[in-house]
Image: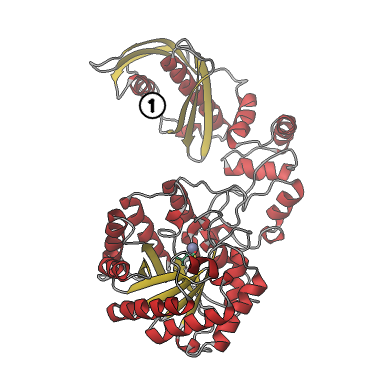
């Protein structure tokens, strides 16, 4: 490869499964690692660093299986500058369609002092280990760990040795997150200009985020000539983490005008990967994290919401759908205006005339003054207060439930439009048996979206509050009830939601859709 070829292409090297998994507490199971690797491969990551095979039997097995399953990505295994490490890494990755050995050694004065190697001894070690790796594998990456704190002359010397020994990628790590964008760029530029053979290899950048500059440092390195960015999903990694894949990829996409480099990443897969990595690593994503944080595409202030509803580009530099996020981006609070409320209600399947909206808006402002964030559930409840004024068509008259190790059965009598109807049913548990009776007495097609039980007080005599959420043809209703008997509270909440659904159907003039109940008594 020459200095000027492939100018516009940047390789994405993901190390979530190696550097990311090194975060204390972020250990993933074997199956989880395979799942994340498959998602990375599908997303278009060029190189997946799948693990550190000599570190443990588990790491070895995971890297070997990821290598066998790989489709498009290069699969890389890490090794220290020791021959048994390199052999073990090769053993793990050899069956990949495109295997890569990555070997590293700390080159800064501090890191040289730990194995107590002189500059010459270390240079010799680098030559020997890179040569050994290259005899096993055509694709060899070499990293001088703590490169950003290594003397420039010595760095140039060891990079040249690694290239001569057969390294095909030279990775320049900012191991302790110490560099800054201009320095990061200058370092890459100096190496490309000074080291003989630099035009034969790909330079990579690997930045940690200790000063919050990892993404900026990586992009600066690219502008200076690096053509591989090492990163992790959600910026997972040691201490403050690594450059976040989603940040560099979206920065290159959104600011292609000033950083004209392409990646192969299918950005619409980003959100799903971010959520899976958060779930399996147990490292939740901070709400205001760029690109993938819960608030990254949410607008709360009235001015912003109004702007976004008129023209989304007023306050969004990328579309949520660019990263595979297809959710509503308006969060209601005390700064929200009437247009935002109408839009939010519409998304919840609630349409209303101007007068009714005015009334709901007054109650919404009152609630928003008392509550920081008004959730969908609060809004649905607000709208329902008005609807509850109508008489209930359904009510519970009698419920008897038998439960225990022998099975569960419910017998129920309900009043439906003034008439008594009874039914008995078994089920998977007492609540399921009782809900089956409601469905038999009043047949309907509404889907149960949410069933939640909260204990309001402590102790075995606690009052249980139950919420039930039903959805039918885009209409969403919730029902609540409280009782010391959880099954009674559940049935009443279910019936409450059904009564609200009947009011909503009537309002939409679609009573014709209502399934007439058959007498099952
Ligand atoms: O941060 C670092 O220096 C590393 C090396 C192993 C590349 O992760
Ligand atoms: Zn690292």
Say which quarter of the image contains residue 126. bottom left
Q: Using the image, determine if residue 212 lies above or below residue 181.
A: above
Q: At 53% from the left edge and 84% from the top edge, which residue is drawn?
A: 7
Q: Where residue 270 sits in the image (x, y, percent)?
A: 49, 59
Query: How many other residues sit within 10 Å of disc 1, few (<14), some (14-19) or many (≥20)?
Result: some
Q: Mark 1 points at which residue?
A: 443
Q: In this view, does 374 lie to the left or right of 156?
A: right
Q: Where residue 357 sits in the image (x, y, percent)?
A: 70, 36
Q: How many labels does the image show?
A: 1
Q: Where residue 84 sits in the image (x, y, percent)?
A: 29, 68
Q: At 55% from the left edge and 30% from the top edge, which residue is drawn?
A: 506
User: In terms of secondary structure, where does tag 1 sit?
Assistant: loop
Residue 308 visible (yes or no): yes
Q: Using the image, determine if residue 294 lies above or below residue 507.
A: below
Q: At 63% from the left edge and 79% from the top edge, which residue is drawn?
A: 186
Q: Using the image, determine if residue 211 lies above or below residue 451.
A: below
Pick whichever, 386 or 180, lies toward us.
Answer: 180
Q: Is residue 345 left or right of residue 120?
A: right
- Does the numbered disc 1 mark a residue whose Cβ is under 8 Å from ligand 2? no
Pick whichever, 260 or 449, lies toward us.
Answer: 260
Quick one: quadrant of the C terminus? top left
């Amino acid at each position: 490869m020459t200095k000027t070829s492939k100018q516009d292409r940047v390789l994405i090297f993901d190390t979530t499964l190696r550097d990311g998994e090194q975060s204390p507490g972020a250990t993933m199971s074997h199956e989880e690692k395979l799942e994340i690797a498959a998602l990375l491969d599908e997303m278009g990551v060029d190189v997946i660093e799948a693990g550190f095979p000599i570190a443990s039997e588990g790491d070895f097995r995971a890297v070997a299986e990821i290598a066998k399953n790989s489709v498009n990505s290069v699969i890389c295994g890490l090794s220290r500058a020791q021959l048994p490490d390199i052999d073990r890494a090769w053993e793990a990755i050899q069956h990949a369609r495109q295997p890569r050995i990555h070997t590293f050694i700390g080159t800064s004065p501090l890191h040289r002092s730990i194995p107590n190697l002189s500059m010459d001894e270390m240079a010799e070690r680098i030559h020997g280990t890179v040569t050994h790796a290259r005899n096993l594998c055509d694709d060899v990456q070499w990293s001088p760990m703590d490169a950003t704190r290594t003397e420039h002359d010595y760095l140039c010397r060891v990079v040249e040795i690694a290239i001569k020994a057969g390294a095909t990628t030279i990775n320049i790590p900012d191991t302790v997150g110490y560099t800054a964008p201009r320095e990061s760029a200058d370092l890459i530029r100096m190496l490309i200009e000074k080291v003989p053979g630099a035009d034969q290899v790909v330079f990579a950048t690997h930045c940690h985020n200790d000063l919050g500059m990892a993404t900026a440092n990586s992009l600066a390195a690219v502008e200076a000539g690096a053509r591989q960015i090492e990163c992790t999903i959600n910026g997972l990694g040691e201490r403050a983490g690594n450059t976040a894949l989603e940040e560099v990829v979206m920065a290159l996409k959104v600011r292609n005008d000033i950083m004209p480099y392409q990646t192969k990443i299918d950005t619409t897969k980003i959100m799903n990967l971010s959520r899976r990595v958060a779930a399996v690593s147990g490292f939740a994503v901070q709400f205001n994290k760029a690109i993938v944080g819960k608030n990254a595409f949410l607008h709360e202030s009235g001015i912003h919401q109004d702007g976004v509803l008129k023209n989304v580009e007023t306050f969004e530099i990328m579309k949520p759908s660019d990263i595979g996020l297809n959710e509503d981006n308006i969060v209601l609070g005390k700064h929200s205006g009437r247009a935002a409320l109408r839009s939010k209600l519409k998304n919840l399947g609630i349409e209303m005339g101007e007068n009714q909206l005015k009334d709901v808006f007054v109650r919404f402002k009152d609630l928003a003054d008392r509550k920081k964030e008004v959730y969908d559930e609060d809004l649905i409840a607000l709208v329902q207060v008005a609807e509850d004024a109508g008489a209930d068509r359904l009510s519970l008259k009698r419920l008897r439930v038998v439960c225990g190790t022998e099975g569960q059965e419910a017998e129920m009598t309900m009043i439906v439009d003034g008439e008594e109807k009874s039914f008995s049913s078994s089920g998977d548990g007492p609540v399921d048996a009782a809900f089956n009776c409601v469905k038999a007495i009043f047949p309907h097609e509404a889907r149960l979206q949410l069933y939640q039980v909260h204990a309001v007080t402590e102790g075995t005599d606690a009052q249980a509050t139950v919420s039930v959420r039903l959805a039918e043809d885009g209409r969403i209703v919730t029902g609540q009830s409280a009782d010391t008997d959880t099954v009674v509270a559940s049935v009443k909440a279910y019936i409450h939601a059904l009564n609200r659904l009947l009011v909503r159907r009537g309002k939409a003039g679609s009573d014709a859709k209502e399934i007439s109940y058959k007498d099952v008594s």
